[in-house]
Image (cartoon, rainbow, N blue to C red):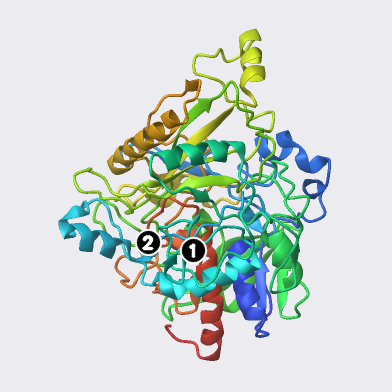
Amino acid sequence: MAKTLPKRSVVIVGGGLTAGLVARQLTAQNIDVLVLERGVDHRHGAESRLPTQRDELRWSTRQGLMQDWSVQPYSLRHNRRDPSYPIRWMSAFLPGEGMGGAANHWNGQSWRWSEYDPAIRTRYESRYGKAFIPANMPLRDWGVSYAQMEPYHDLFEKLFGVAGQAGNLRGTIQPGGNPFEGPRSNEYPQKPLEITEAGSIFKSAAQSLGFKPFPGPAANSTGAYTNPDGQKLGQCQYCGHCERFICEAQAKGTPEVLLYPMLLQRKSFEIRLRAHVLGVNYDAQAKRATGVRYVDLVTGKEYVQPADVVVLGAFTMTNTRLLLLDGIGKPYDPGTQTGVVGRNFCYQTLSGVDVFFKDRWINPFLASGGTTTVIDEFNNDNFDHSGLGFLGGGSIGASVTNGRPIASRAVPAGTPRWGTEWKAANAAWYAHAFNVWAQGSCYPDRENFLDLDHAYTDAYGQPLLRMTFDFRDNEVKMSHWVTQKIGAIAKAMRPDIMGSVEGLKPSFDTRVYQTTHVTGGTPMGADPAHSVVSPHLQHWDAQNLFVVGASVYPHNSGFNPTGPLAALALRLGDDLISYAKRPRML
């Protein structure tokens, strides 16, 4: 029988980026916070020190910092007519595990989305008319504006020492930055990263076609940096071990460097590691969460942790699954288009073109996760969609984030997959190739959703979370169009060899990594009929239950989701300070 523990003021499920940011705001006001995290503290392990930190096989290939798929996998089907099957080894996206979560092994690319993104439906309807959005695309406004989020974007960038070049400073377009970005109150706290050889080639070609390339913003520190909380970053060494790795130089903005060491010094903060949350206790009559249930992975004992406020701050999939397991909110039904939990599940739509240069030395191993050079002319609605037959778009850029020996082996099409010729091609092209990519948006489709699997369970006997997802017609058309733009830029580079110019095709393949940018499942909005949480991230059916993370996004953009996610988390922290003083629907 589970043991009931003393009640806590605020309990946060998941010990990643959002939990750390929410807790930062709350504990500054001496509000009691308990974080439950199923992983461990990575700060002193083999993953954080040389030479074991750079073990590509252990941390990258074998996913040493990721969710354990033998314990809690997902299942997948591409449409409702198909049976689902459990995914025993996921490569498409990589949820993190441990104090700091996926933001420990991220690349550091730290984007703000466009000013119109939080009002995406209004944007398209006002520009093209209400009939322009397809009936099977449930795009929704967020209920919060970019202007309301901007101060929190600014704070996050200072906390994480983000390096970049402003493109819109207080309404004035700045040379060298992104001319499409929303107005910023301040310049980035650090200068941009060094441009790579690949970025230099891309920049020249893009400018020759009339585009405006700029350095991608990144939480890879370009110098010694101290943030507003007194936490420090070292200078990036361009070692090529960002994504899938802990930064041994502590030069990458991560929660385990910048948030949790500071939080652990605060008396009102506690984190319990190796605590796997099984569910949220919910009083349906009172419409309140009373606490959470979890198992201590060290002792195997189960506990009930009562709470005045519960915050779901876990990965996209976990936030959704916990609500479905305990029936908090009506599950989404794609047939009737009713229900909310599990709807608007999105991914991203990536494509690219490989380019090879005999006489250009690319130095792929001299890189960081954020050394990108980008154009934004074809992202979302930054261009006219009239007559194109799709919505959305993507950022286009060139980046060489690593030259690690196992995975970084670009060779021309037609090269044998093994043997002497394959070895020769690797030697010839290793330092002479890179990819020009598009990180494409993914808009919701009524047939893409999350629910509980009826056939498969995890190691705890609970139903797996089931993905019903594929790249639908809108994303296929968009990807094909945007990839032609990539092809034009790649051709302008005049490479010796250029790869095929093809957009992404169905079907979604969990064996192929894209990004860890899955969104939706608990979308936010002003209308309870189409959203799980309010614009203040408060559950419509439980006043003291809040959800934060990429699961609240009603759509996915052509940029990494971390920036808005962090801004919303900091804003939620301030909202919870107000809620603690006077509990109510915010």
* Residue in view at x 41 percent, y 53 percent: 557
Q: Residues within 10 Å of mark 2 (few under 14, many from 20)?
A: many
Q: Residue furthest top?
A: 420
How far across and down, in percent of the image, does residue 191 sit?
A: 63, 58
Q: Is residue 324 visible?
A: no
Q: Disc 1, disc 2: CB below 8 Å?
A: yes
Instruction: Please state, as top left, top right, bottom left or bottom right, where the N terminus lies in the image.
Output: bottom right
Q: Residues within 10 Å of mark 1 (few under 14, many from 20)?
A: many
Asked if residue 217 is positioned above or below residue 290 in the image, the reply reads above
Asked if residue 436 is positioned above or below residue 288 in the image, the reply reads above
Instruction: Please state, as top left, top right, bottom left or bottom right, where the C terminus lies in the image.
Output: bottom left
Q: Which quadrant of the view contains residue 522?
A: bottom left
Give the SS element for disc 1: helix
Q: Nearest the camera: 343 or 238? A: 238
- Total tally of numbered discs in the picture: 2
Q: Is residue 543 visible?
A: yes
Q: Earlier in the sequence, mark 1 or mark 2?
A: 2
Amino acid type at image mark 1: Pro
Query: With 562 as the anchor, is 83 left or right in this view?
Result: left
How far across and down, in percent of the image, does residue 513 sit?
A: 53, 37
* Residue in view at x 58 percent, y 49 percent: 95
Question: Which residue was labeled with disc 2?
Answer: 117
Measure the alpha-carbon separation of dots 1 and 2.
10 Å
How far across and down, in percent of the image, does residue 272 sit?
A: 72, 66
Q: Which mark is residue 145?
A: none
Give the SS element for disc 2: helix
Question: Which residue was labeled with disc 1?
Answer: 564
How far across and down, in percent of the image, does residue 507 sit?
A: 38, 33
Q: Nearest the camera: 200 or 95? A: 200
